[in-house]
Image (cartoon, rainbow, N blue to C red):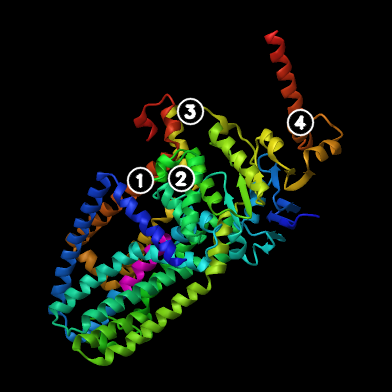
Amino acid sequence: MEKSLSIKVRNLSKSYGSFHAVKNVNLEIKKGELFCFLGPNGAGKTTTIKMMTGLLEPGIGEIEIAGTNIWKSPIEAKKKMAYIPDHPILYPKLSGREFLRFIGSVFQIDQDVFEERMEKYLSLFELSGRADELIESYSHGMKQKINLCGAFIRQPDVLFLDEPTVGLDPKGAKTLKNLLQSMCRQGMTVFMSTHILEIAEQMCDRVGIIKNGEIIAIGTMEELRQKEGKTQSSLEDLFLELTGDADTLHLIQELTDDDEKVEK
Amino acid sequence: MTKKLLLLFWKMGKNQFRTAPDSTKIAVVLSTIAALFVTVILSIGVGAMATILPRESYSSLISFAFSGLLAFNILFGVPQVFKNLYGTNDLAFLFTLPIKTRSIYWVKFLQSFVGVPGVLWIFSIILLTVFGVVSKASFVYFPVTCIASLMITLIGMSIAYLINLLLIQIIPVHRAKELMTAMSALAGLFVYVLFQLPNLLSKNEIEEEVLGEMPQMPKWIPMEWAGRSLNEASFGSSEFILPLLLLLVLVIFMLSLSAALVEKGFRTGWIKLNEGNRPKKKRKRSKTAVKIHHPIIAIGIKEWRAIHRDMREWVMFLPFLFFMFFPVISMINDKDSLQFIINHPDVSWLIAQGTFLFMFPFLTGGFASSSIGREAYSIHLLRILIIRMDYSIG
C-alpha cells in the first residue's frame, strides 16, 4: 500500500522579471521519507524551500503540506511544519530556555510534555548547561542547535532543513543525523537541502537535484545510478556529472592523481 | 497569540535592560535628563503664553500644537514603522509559525508606539497640562488632554502605517530598495500640506486679526476638533464631547483602514521586499576598476562606493530638510519677513549662524555614525590588513 503524501508540489515556478529562479518544479514526498534536495549555489534550492514554507509567494503552482495548501490555509499548514533556515533566526535577547518556551506556547504543547521534550533535546544537543544564557552569547553552532531543539519539540509532520549541519560540531551533526532517521521512522517527513553529499548518500531515501531552477534528477541512489548507467558511482560523481561539472570532476581527479604520485 | 507575542517582547525588553552595559544605562539617564531640561524650558514658555494669550485664541493655538504633534508623528513614524514592518529579522521566523499576520501586525504597531510616538504623546501631555494649570482650566480639561493627544498620536501613526502599506504595493519589486526615499518624500509633502492648510483654506480675515494674526484651522480637520474639544473642556463645558467623539470615530476608521491592508500590505509586502531581485546585468569591466591606489585612498573609495551604492543613507536627512526648506521658501515669498531680515542683520546673522551650527553637527554626526556602524560588520577585515586602525576607520 502506498504511503500518504506529506509534501505535494505542483508546477511550482518563480520568476524575477525575465529571470526564472524556479521552473515548473513537481515533487511528491511520502510520509516518513527523508528527502535530500541538492544543487549548486544559486540553483534555486532556498527559493523552493522558502516557497514551500510560506516565506515566498510562488509565481504559479501549488504546495500542499500534509494535505493543506500553505498559501490557502497558512495557519493550518504551519501547525504541521517546522523550518530551520541555513542562518538561524533567533531572538538574541532571550535565553535558550525562554526561546523554547515561546515555541511551546505558540504550538500550545502540554506543559508536562513540553518540559520532558525540552530537557531531552537540550541534553541531546549538550545545551542543558547553557540553556539559561542569552542566545546572543551562543556560537553559530549552538544557535543552530537551539533552533533544532525548537523544531523537534513541536514534533512537526514535516521538517524543512536548509543546510542544517553548517556550524555543527561532529557530535552535534551525528546527533542530528540519528534524530532525523529515528523521527522519520516514526512518521515525520524531512525535506533537507545540503551541500554535504556524504550526508545525502548515507541518510536519504531519495535525492532531488536542481539546477538553474529545474529538477534535473530525482530518485533513490540506485535509480540515479541506473539512469546514468554508472552502477558504481558515488553521489558526488553523479552530482558533478548531472550538474554539468564534469570538467571540475576531471580536474579533481587529476589533482588527486598528482597527490598520489607525489606521495609515492 | 497577540498576548504571547507581547509577553515575548516584554521579556526581551527586560533582558535588554538587564544586560545593557553601564555606559548604555548612563547614556539613557543623561538623555532623559536632557529631555527633561528641554521639557522644563518649553513648559516655562508654554506657561508664559497661557498668561499672555486671550482665551479666545486657545482653540487655534492648541490646534496648531496638535498639527505639530501629528507632523512629528508622521515624519519620525514613517522610518520607524518601515523598520518594524519590513526591516526586522524576526519576521522570517514569525511568518513560519502558525500566528495570524494580524496579531504580528498589532504587536508591531504597539512596538512602534513605544518609540517616538509614545515619547511625543507624553511630551504633549506635559506641555498641555502646564498650559491648563497656568490658564486655570477646569478639571475636565486634563483627562481630555490625555485622550485627545493620544488620538492625534494614533492618527499620525495610522497615516505613517498607511503610507508604508500603500507604497509597498505601488513600488515595483526591483525598486523596493528606494521605497524609503519615496515614503520620506511623501511624508514630507503630507506634512507641508498639513501646515499650509490653514493658509490655503482660511477666509476669515476678521478673526485672524483678533487672534494675533494666527490663521484659523479649517473646521473639518481633526486637529481643529481636538483644539475645540480642549478649549470647551478648559471652560468646563460639556461641548467638548462631540469633537472628541468625532476624533474617536476617525481614529477607529484610520486604524481599521490600516488593519484592512495588513494581509496585502504587510505580509505580501514583506515577502516582496525579501524575495530578492533578478540578477543584475554584468557591467563591462573597465581598466580603471583594477587600478591600484594608496591604502588611504583605497579606503576612501570603498567608503564613497558604500555611500553611493546605498543612497538610502541620505534619506534620514529628508524630514529635516523639509523642516528647513519650507520655512525658508515661505520667508522668501513673504516681503515683510524678507524686509525684516534685511533691516535687522543682528538678528538674521544670529539665525544664520545657528542654522549652520545646527546643520554641521547634524550632518557630520549622521554620516559619521552610519559610516562607523556600517564598518562594524567588516571591522575584522580591516584589522587583518596592514593599515593603521585610525586610517582604516577614516
Real-space CA distance between mark 2 and mark 3, rounded to the nearest whole angstrom: 19 Å
For badge 2, the amino acid type reads Ile
Label 4 packing within 10 angstroms: few (<14), some (14-19), many (20+) = some
Magenta span: B67-80
- Residue position marked by numbered label 4 in the rendering: A234
Q: Residue at x 36, y 82 (%)?
A: B247
Marks 4 and 2 close (CB-CB < 8 Å):
no
Real-space CA distance between mark 1 and mark 4, rounded to the nearest whole angstrom: 53 Å
Within the image, what quadrant is residue B380 found in?
A: top left
Real-space CA distance between mark 1 and mark 2, rounded to the nearest whole angstrom: 13 Å
Residue nearest the observer in this picture, A186 or B25? A186
Label 1 packing within 10 angstroms: few (<14), some (14-19), many (20+) = few
Label 4 residue SS: loop
User: In terms of secondary structure, what is the magenta stretch mainly?
Assistant: helix
Q: Residue at x 53, y 33 (%)?
A: A169
Q: N-terminal of the two: label 3 or label 1?
A: 3
Res. B293 mark? 3
Check the residue under mark 2 and report the chain it is in: B
* Dots 1 and 4 on the same chain: no
For badge 1, the amino acid type reads Ser
Real-space CA distance between mark 3 and mark 1, rounded to the nearest whole angstrom: 26 Å
